[in-house]
Amino acid sequence: MSELLVDFITSLDGYASGEGWPGFWGLEGPDYLAWLNEQPEVTYLMGAHTYRLMSGFAAGEVPDGQDEFRPEEEASVDELTQAAKVVFSSSLEGPLTWANSTLVRDDAVETVRAMKADGTGLLSTIGSLSLARSLLRAGLVDRFRVVMFPVITGATGAERVYDGYPDVALDMTEHRTFDGRIQLVEYAPRVLEHPPLSAPA
């Protein structure tokens, strides 16, 4: 049976990106980059928006506000190009041009449920906030990991990660600090029917 990981890179205040900020918030260090390179083989799950963005980077489109990719960003995109990717979309036209990408038009929750039951290895979302939210609501997520970078982007932050989420209890399974400033926390999530003080009498 496969394991499903929801994996986010965020600012401390829970934004997935920010206007004027580079990838990794410009704060990746050698410890964090070495850890990224040690990650096991994974099949990535994404929606149409993330596919368009990341496949554009793979084709050479540079993020707004940058003249070129930094080496760390280029290496990250190259790794994604080599990895298996499953893209859930009713709007994209197939066949997909980004290498190792498979387009799925069926319901994402039921497809991932079947992938987990029939497969082995690790499945992981990348970006794709609404997909990750749907998979969590359905109780399919085994591991919920967040790497928080030491910035608050109250003025420029975009893509609030947790908007629309249910209440979720999180049991910590791992934590780690990279380069003295980047914090990883990983949890086993459990979706709550109601918060503790709203329990039925």
Image: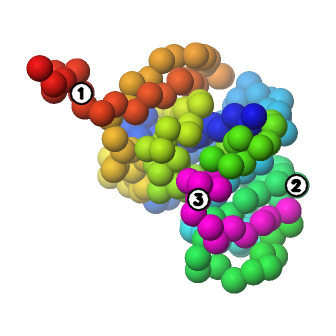
Q: Residue at 59% of width from left, 30% of height from top? A: 143
Q: Quadrant of residue 98?
A: bottom right
Residue at left offset 84%, top offset 52%: 83
Quarter in which the N terminus is drawn: top right
Q: Give the residue at x 74% y 37%.
A: 2
User: Distance from label 1 to label 3 (Cα)?
Assistant: 27 Å
**Considering depth in this image, is 58 or 50 the residue closer to the camera?**
50
Q: Which residues are magenta?
A: 100-112
* Residue 23: % across, % down: 62, 50
CA separation in Å, label 2 and label 1: 42 Å
In this view, the mark in front (3 or 2): 3
Category of crowding for the residue at label 2, using alpha-carbon neighbours closer than 10 angstroms: few (below 14), some (14–19), many (at least 20)? few
User: Would residue 111 be counted in the magenta stretch?
Assistant: yes
Q: Quadrant of the C terminus?
A: top left
Separation of marks 3 and 2 at Cα, in angstroms: 22 Å
Callout 3 environment at 10 Å: few (<14), some (14 to 19), or many (20+)? Answer: many
Q: Which mark is residue 195?
A: 1
Q: Which numbered disc covers residue 82?
A: 2
In which image quadrant can residue 89 be found? bottom right
